[in-house]
């Protein structure tokens, strides 16, 4: 039997949503072709779709591609330019149904190479039941001399994490995603850098991570994640999904993670913290502004697909307001403004409307064909910092030399601020 093959980012809400959407799409349009959906971890997803040319060669008809990779995918001619298809038959209320920050990263070389699938910038997720508890507030003030509230500075974050760290209750002050997959620690490093007034780019618009703000960022982060009196002991083993699940199971007072994991903790059955959580902006160093990171997932069509029209028809169906809302109710994050403001969704997830606020402070990553390799280098330097005593300055200087070699002959596109 003929099949359409979809490479799916491995995550239960994505898998369940895609299956429900395909079933509904097939029924509505009398489609007899079966969809084969293969859930894949981040590294495997990148390898099979881009590195191994799966999208270009027709192995995959549709794939979840995140915006970290889209420049690479376009550079490799792996994904279909949707510009003319959108012009002829646009998704419902395109482009006005989405925030502008969810439409620009997939626009490259005068083309449009994907439609927004799953969103949710990085934020501070916290247990409001702990922060609002009168006994906790009283004890915290006695110990630290100031009122307990969500941390505005990184120093406050560290102190609050220590305060709530109670291993005997299987409760830890904070949880991180320190599994070296080329993503989580890279994003954490960027957030630490930006909230100290730093940038990934120098005045010549070149990637440069050997500077004072980067040294301070790495110094704090390596100390924080190694603090056994403040951090979940399994953070080294956790990716963002595992860290999100640990938070949902009530194992942490705070987490720096994607908005989607706060939402997930409100909707999945196994969550032990439903109704007990909230989100807010990230802390920053005194004198500097908060920041968030906007990396989002796209629906893309393989340039080698034999089912391009069918794939696009499904993408239009999968991005309707109803489909976007379904993704959210399953535990993902819808991208449409209508979902963010939906009354039912905000009853289910009371902080959902805050997505717009996060987008206003969201940075994006530089768009360059070398970014995946730069991300690997940053991932490596953060891991080395966590595991050794070599100074942050030396580590960053060595890494910057490697980045400089990669950068020769490449051009940077786009900016790092929405």
Image: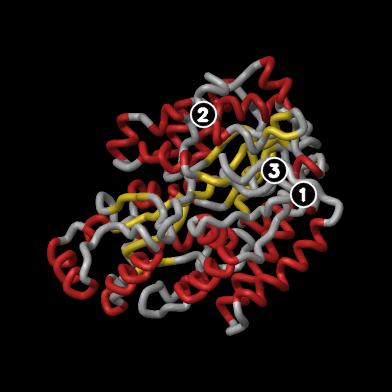
Choose the circle earlier in sequence order: 3 or 2: 3
Query: What is the crowding at mark 1: few (fewer than 14 residues within 10 Å), some, or many (at least 20)?
Result: many
Where is mark 2, residue-wise?
A: 98
Report helix, strand or loop for mark 3. helix
Task: Say above or below: 233 vs 343.
Answer: below
Q: Does the image show residue 290?
A: yes
Q: How many marks?
A: 3
Upstream in sequence: badge 1 or badge 3: 3
Regarding mark 1 in the picture, which secondary structure is present there?
loop
Q: Nearer the viewer, residue 69 or 191?
A: 191
Q: Which residue is identified by label 1?
A: 369
Query: How would you rate the neighbour count of disc 2 (Cα within 10 Å): few for under 14, some for 14-19, many for 20 or more?
Result: some
> Looking at the rendering, in which quadrant would you find the N terminus?
top right
Q: Position of residue 106 (x, y in %)?
A: 66, 36
Mark 3 and mark 1 in contact (Cβ < 8 Å)? no
Cα gap from disc 1 to disc 3, whole angstroms: 9 Å
Name the N-terminal-most of marks 2 and 1: 2
Position of residue 412 in the picture relative to residue 119 (left or right): right
The residue sitting at 51% across, 42% down in the picture is 119
Residue 129 position within the rendered picture, expressed as x and y whole percent measured from the top left? 22, 57
* Residue 300 % position (x, y): 67, 37
Where residue 208 appears, x then y in whole percent? Answer: 69, 59
Colour convention of the picture:
secondary structure
Contact? badges 2 and 1 (CB < 8 Å): no
Identified at 82% across, 63% down, the residue is: 405
Q: Which mark is residue 70?
A: 3
């Amino acid at each position: 039997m003929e099949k359409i093959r979809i490479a799916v980012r491995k995550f239960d809400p994505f898998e369940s949503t895609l299956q429900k959407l395909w079933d509904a799409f097939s029924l509505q349009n009398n489609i007899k072709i079966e969809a084969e959906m293969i859930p894949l971890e981040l590294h495997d997803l990148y390898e099979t779709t881009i590195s191994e040319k799966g999208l270009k060669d027709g192995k995959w008809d549709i794939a979840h591609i995140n915006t970290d990779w889209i420049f690479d995918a376009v550079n490799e001619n792996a994904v279909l330019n949707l510009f003319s298809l959108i012009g002829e038959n646009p998704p419902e209320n395109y482009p006005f149904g989405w925030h502008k920050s969810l439409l620009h990263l997939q626009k490259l070389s005068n083309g449009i190479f994907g439609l927004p699938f799953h969103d949710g910038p990085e934020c501070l997720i916290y247990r409001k039941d702990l922060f609002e508890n009168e006994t906790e507030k009283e004890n915290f003030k006695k110990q630290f001399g100031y009122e307990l509230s969500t941390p505005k500075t990184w120093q406050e974050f560290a102190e609050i994490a220590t305060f709530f760290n109670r291993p005997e209750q299987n409760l830890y002050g904070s949880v991180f995603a320190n599994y070296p997959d080329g993503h989580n620690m890279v994003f954490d490093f960027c957030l630490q850098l930006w909230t100290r007034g730093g940038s990934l780019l120098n005045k010549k618009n070149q990637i440069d991570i050997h500077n004072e703000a980067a040294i301070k960022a790495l110094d704090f982060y390596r100390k924080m994640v190694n603090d056994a009196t403040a951090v979940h002991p399994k953070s080294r083993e956790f990716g963002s999904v595992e860290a999100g699940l640990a938070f949902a199971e009530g194992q942490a007072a705070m987490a720096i993670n994607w908005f989607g994991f706060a939402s997930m903790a409100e909707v999945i059955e196994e969550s032990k913290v439903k109704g007990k959580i909230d989100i807010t902006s990230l802390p920053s160093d005194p004198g500097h502004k908060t920041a968030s990171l906007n990396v989002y997932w796209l629906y893309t069509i393989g340039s080698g697909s034999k089912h391009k029209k069918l794939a696009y028809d499904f993408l239009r169906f999968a991005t309707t307001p109803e489909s976007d809302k379904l993704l959210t109710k399953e535990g993902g994050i819808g991208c449409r403004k209508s979902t963010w403001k939906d009354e039912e969704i905000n009853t289910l997830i009371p902080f959902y409307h805050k997505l717009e606020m996060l987008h206003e402070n969201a940075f994006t990553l530089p768009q360059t064909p070398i970014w995946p390799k730069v991300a690997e280098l940053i991932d490596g330097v953060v891991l080395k910092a966590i595991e050794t005593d070599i100074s942050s300055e030396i580590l960053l200087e060595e890494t910057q030399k490697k980045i400089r070699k990669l950068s020769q002959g490449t051009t940077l596109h786009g900016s790092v601020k929405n």
